[in-house]
Image (cartoon, rainbow, N blue to C red):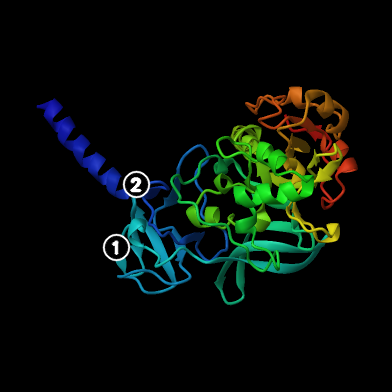
Amino acid sequence: MFLALVLVYGGIFASIEARIAPQKCTVNINSDLATPQPLYFYYNTTDFVTTTTGTSQFNLDGKQKIQLFCTDGFRKPYDEEMLTAACISGNQFQIENKSGRLIDAICNNFPNHTTRFTDRKCTVGNIVEIGFDVRVGLWVPVLEICHDDKTGSTKWVHHMLKPNNAYHQRNVERIFFIQGPFYRGLRPDSLYSKIVQRKTIARILGSEALASKIVQDDSEMYMSRGHLAAKADYVFAPQQLATFYYINAAPQWQSFNNGNWLKIEIGVKKFIEKRNIDTDVYTGTHEVFTFPDIHGKYQEIYLAHTNNSRTNRIPVPRYYYKVLIAESINAGIALIGVNNPYVSDEFIEKEYILCPDIGDKVKYIDWNRTNVTAGYSYACSVADFVKVVKHLPPLPKVTKLLL
C-alpha cells in the first residue's frame, strides 16, 4: 500500500514538475529547417542565430523569439517577408499567429545575397562586402573583400570563425559562381574551363603540347575556382551560398584545392572549436604563378591573356594563405600553401619559403605538407609573414603563436 501511494504521488509530482519546468526548443539544422531556407535572426537584432558549439543544432529558451527573413516572401500559409517565431517546446513554434515548425516556413527562393562597395579602403581600392539587404537601410554583411578589378585579382577575404562553425548544414546544393559588377569585359565562367585554360596557356608558353601536359582532362591537374572564404565555413545554407562569387575565388590547382588546402580548412575549424576561441581569418593570394615557356623562360600565367601584358587579368596565384588572429588570447599564425604542383623540392626551398617555417609545430592540421602535388605548405609567425606580404590591412600585434 505504501509503495502504491509513493508511486501515485511521485507521478503527480513528476507531472506538475513537467508542467512548471521551463520549456526549450531544440532545432537540428540538417533535419528541422526549410528549403529554400530563410535567414534566422535573434529577435530585433541583426545577429544570425548560432548553433551550440559541438552540435548540429541550436537551442532557444521557452517563449524566446527569432525572426525569419525571405527576400521574395514565404510560401503559404505565410505571405510576409519577415516572420516572428516564438519557441513553444521541442521543434514547435508559434509563427506569427499559427502553431508550427520552422520546417514549415519555406521561402519562395533563398534570400538574395549581393555585393556592395564600402567607403573603407584597402591597398587596391574600396573594400567590397558580400551580404544581405534585409530591409531598406538594413544591410547584414557576411564577409569583406579586398579586390583589384584592374587585374581581376582578390588580395584577401576577411571573415570570422567561431567555435560553432565546426558544424554546418550538409547537402546544400552548390550554385554557379556569380560575376557581379566585376571583371568587366571578361567571362570568368568561360575562362575557368579546361579547354580555354589550355588555349590561354598555349599562347603564353608558345606551345599547345606543353599546355596540354599542364592542364589535363583525366587528373586533378587543372585550375579550379578556389574558394577563399570556404562554403563550409558558414553554418547555414543562405550564408554558404553567398560565398559563390568570383571575387571570393582565385585559380587554384585542383590537386592543391582537394589536398593540403582542404586539410587546412578542416583543421583550422576543428582547432578553433577545440580551443573555444573566436578567430579573425584573412584568406588571400600572393604573387603570380610562373611556368617555363618553350624557350625555358618563366612566364606569368593568367586566365585572361592578350599580347599586351598590361591587359593580362585574373592571375593564377603563386601562393594561397590564411592568417589567423585570435586577439582574445594574443595569438596568431600564417598558414601558406604553394599553388604549383610542378615545382621541384629543391626549387621550393630556394624560391618559395617567404618567412621562417614553423610548420612542424602545427599539430592541428592533418596535412602532407611537403607533398608538392597536394600543395607544399608551411607556417610562419604573423609578424614574419606581414614583413613580406604587405597588402594586408593593419592587424592586431599578437605576440604568441596560435598552436
Q: Residue furthest left?
A: 1
Q: Residue at x 38, y 69 (%)?
A: 74
Circle 2 Cα neighbour tier, 10 Å, few/some/many (<14 / 14–19 / ≥20)? few
Q: Nearer the viewer, residue 131 or 15?
A: 131
Q: Nearer the viewer, residue 75 or 23?
A: 75
Looking at the rendered structure, which numbered label has been put on residue 255?
none
Inspect the image, locate mark 1, and give the three-letter code of the amino acid beneath it. Ser
Q: Secondary structure at mark 1?
A: strand
For discs 1 and 2, the disc positioned in front in the rendered view = 1
Q: Secondary structure at mark 2?
A: loop
Give the percent coordinates (x, y) of residue 335: 74, 35
Q: Which residue is mark 1?
A: 99
Q: Nearer the viewer, residue 302 or 47?
A: 302
Give the percent coordinates (x, y) of residue 222: 63, 41
Q: Which residue is mark 2?
A: 21
Q: Can residue 278 be seen from the camera position used here? A: no
**Left or right: where 218 falls relative to 281:** left
**Left or right: where 372 falls relative to 170:** right
Give the percent coordinates (x, y) of residue 67: 46, 64
Residues under labels 1 and 2: Cα distance? 21 Å
Inspect the image, locate mark 2, and give the three-letter code of the amino acid beneath it. Ala
**Left or right: where 308 falls relative to 56:** right
Q: First in sequence: mark 1 or mark 2?
A: 2
